[in-house]
Image (cartoon, rainbow, N blue to C red):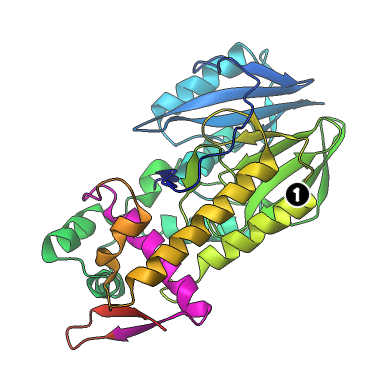
Amino acid sequence: MRDGFQDIEVQSPRPKLNYPFERGPAVGESVEIAAGVRWMRMPLGGSLAFINVWAIEEDGGWAIVDTGMGGPDTQQAWRTVFAGPLGGRPASRVFVTHMHPDHIGMSGWLTRKYGCQLWISRLEFLMCRSLAADTGREAPEDALTFYRAAGWDEEALENYRVRFGGFGKGLHALPDSFRRVSDGDVIEIGGRPWEVVIGAGHSPEHVCLWQPDLKLFISGDQVLPKISSNVSVFPTEPEGDPLSEWLSSLARIKARVRDDVLVLPAHNDPFHGLHARVDHLIGGHERGLARLHRLIAEPRRVVDVFPVLFRRKIDHNVLGLATGESLAHLNCLIARGMAVREEDEAGVAWYRAV
């Protein structure tokens, strides 16, 4: 599961963010972000190459935030950082921002190895367990109907059948229990209060952590400096409106979290400029919605709208992501009363502006 596309905004330049670190840590190394807070990277492969993870020093060891993708390469990377930069001290607990495998994948390995607890929001834990249960299943007919309605041809559907059930392959066996965190919770980590700030849209109940005194904001995938986070509709909730949820949660973050924070994102480098980045993300999607609304003056299928939302060529590797994001925009227009969906006799959905 990809976390998103590179920004596609072409009508408005990306804001000038400030990146205070000349270089990030190599895999197996760490960089001190603030007193008792360390930045590390875990390997991913592919275009993103790595995910940022964080360690906060506290009595008894290190509170870990996000864990990397399950697998032997990540296990070895964790062994190296615990033996080296983390001084041989154990993980005292594991926080996970959300349920995607590159974030939660090694949580079971870490919690079992160090006998500690997973801290996560309830919806993220339960959704992850639900998706992991699909591992090895055949693609359900509901999902094939969903993608036929989007305009997929038989080759694309067959490719989906082959790939279905792969979510759990990026996970070490999940922990069997968790400690729930909720919006507004204030949790003492490393002797300082960290406030839980919940986002939505990219995932159902995404956890961010804000420490006002250190001026740090661990944003996970909710706010990224160079990538527009994946906000998609999936076959499990075909009428969902995650884009509205994402836009409103970004606005809440801007209103709640001060602009003087150093943002610690899951991908790319830590940066200053939270409010400018939030404004740019919201504005980019609003402009995308406007372009889409103009395009569907004449009825279009989902696969027909890619050019106004994505600058890159959509091939079979990203077709599912592009379809999910396009549906998120179309469902948002429907929720705003700006579009309708009509199905033809073949079950293909056509979207028209109103």
**Residue 189 or residue 296, whichever sits in front:** 296
Query: Residue 53 is drawn in which quadrant?
Result: top right
Crowd rating for badge 1 (residues with CA inside 10 Å; few <14, some 14–19, many 20+) = many
Q: Is residue 162 visible?
A: yes
How many numbered tags mark residues here?
1
Report x, y in % for residue 13: 51, 41
Q: Residue at x 62, y 32 (%)?
A: 17
Q: Is 211 left or right of 299, judged from the image as shown?
A: right
From what the image shows, is residue 157 above or below residue 261?
A: below
Helix, strand or loop status at disc 1: strand
Q: Residue at x 72, y 58 (%)?
A: 252
Residue furthest to the left in view is 155
Q: Is residue 98 visible?
A: no
**Residue 175 or residue 18, whichever sits in front:** 18
Q: Mark 1 = which residue? A: 196
Q: Is 111 left or right of 68, judged from the image as shown?
A: right
Report x, y in % for residue 190: 82, 30
**The C terminus sits in image quarter:** bottom left
Report x, y in % for residue 176: 58, 51
**Residue 205 or residue 341, whichever sits in front:** 341
Q: Is residue 333 magenta?
A: yes
Q: Residue at x 22, y 83 (%)?
A: 347
Query: Residue 118 is drawn in which quadrant?
Result: top right
Q: Is 258 left or right of 97, judged from the image as shown?
A: right
Q: Residue at x 66, y 49 (%)?
A: 207
**What amino acid does circle 1 point to?**
Val
Q: Is 154 left or right of 252, judged from the image as shown?
A: left
Q: Is residue 83 magenta?
A: no
Magenta region:
314-342
